[in-house]
Image: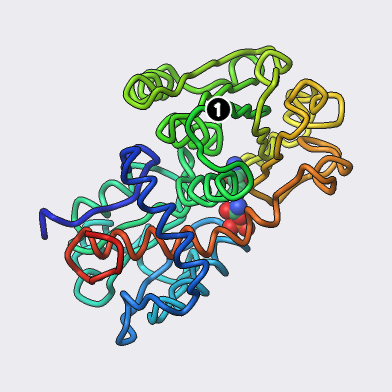
Amino acid sequence: MSNSVRHFLTDLDLTQAEQTEVLDLALAMKKDKYGYKPYAGPQTVVVFFDKTSTRTRVSFAAGIAELGGSPLIVNSGESQLGHKESIADTAKVLERMVSTIVWRTYAQSGLEEMAENSSVPVINALSDDYHPCQLLADLLTVREHKGALDGLSMAYLGDSANNMANSYLLAGVTAGMHVRIAGPAGYLPSAEIIAAAQERAAETGGSVLITTDAAEALAGADVVATDTWVSMGQEDEKAQRMELFREYAVDSAAMAHADKDAVVLHCLPAYRGYEISADVIDGPQSVVFDEAENRVHAQKAIMGWLMAKSNLAEVAGVS
Ligand code: CP
Ligand code: NVA
């Protein structure tokens, strides 16, 4: 196991300067789609899915190929991981075969165990707690539409105890943004996440507002974001959840509180008419398909950056 290896398990794994470097690299890679080859060989990148996916699956497969590598997608139930073999043993085998391990799973602790036992980078492709790759794509999209991130205000409405809420909060304050999270009592970020966000905000000049008042979060916001009210694994609670979050819907009434030039984010997949209305997601302020495309560019950047920082490849612009 190498001490110098870098992983990307939560949004806090990048400092503000590092996040900026990754987003700069993503923009450079977007301009020069086939110009970066940290996985030349082709080297293999394994991508495990314990939950379903469209964007993450395709964007990693496309991005790995564009970086000169070969993606190996392993779906739930197709490997020994998670039932017949420990995570530690899996990591010790895989580090001899692949250049990066990407994993969409349930428990964050599994990703941590994989990383502790791996001399190649491990990337969180969504866990119950975080979706940090999605946030790189979201911040890249905001940068493209709004310029610099620091000082912008970003409101997230809806299920505020889920992976996307945590990641909006942590990645947003890392970028120096003023992040406002609104949801019903009992569905807000944990005290631990709020404390971590406040600590990071104190370093970057960002700020944290946690509220049950959607209008308070939205007031003059530059960015408005939401996510499904029914995350993967919560399907049994669907009926109840579709009622619980109603006053936090991103619809035209909600958007009237935000800045008139605000952009709207949604990581997709979306339930039109629930967390976001059709007129908003299909309207002029929505940047959700730029956001989806940016998964490719952002993930190429984090993969190349981790390889360079772990001294496993050279990538132009990363020292
Ligand atoms: N946004 C996102 O991660 O989408 P998928 O679940 O389709 O990968
Ligand atoms: N919160 C959602 C995000 C999907 C990309 C989920 O975990 O299902």
**Image side of residue 273 versus residue 232, left or right:** right
Residue 292, quarter of the rendered image = bottom right
**Picture layout, residue 200 above or below residue 167:** above
Confirm whether residue 31 shows in the render: yes
Residue picked out by circle 1? 161
Q: What is the crowding at mark 1: few (fewer than 14 residues within 10 Å), some, or many (at least 20)?
A: many
**Image side of residue 144 versus residue 169, left or right:** right
Residue at 54%, 16% in the rendered image:
209
Q: Whole-percent x and y of residue 197?
A: 40, 24
Confirm whether residue 232 shows in the render: no
Residue 281, quarter of the rendered image = top right
The amino acid type found where label 1 is placed reads: Ala
Residue extending farthest front: 147
Closest to the observer: 143 or 162? 143
Closest to the observer: 263 or 46? 263
Quick one: quadrant of the C terminus? Answer: bottom left
Q: Whole-percent x and y of residue 130?
A: 46, 41
Q: Quadrant of ligand 2?
A: top right
Residue at 85%, 38% in the rendered image:
277
Q: Whole-percent x and y of residue 55?
A: 60, 61
Residue at 71%, 40% in the rendered image:
264
Q: Secondary structure at mark 1?
A: loop
**Image side of residue 185 versus residue 256, left or right:** left
**Image side of residue 212 versus residue 198, left or right:** right
**Picture layout, residue 108 above or below residue 75:** above
Quick one: quadrant of the N terminus? Answer: bottom left
Q: Whole-percent x and y of residue 77?
A: 48, 66
Residue at 30%, 68% in the rendered image:
316
Closest to the observer: 281 or 232? 281
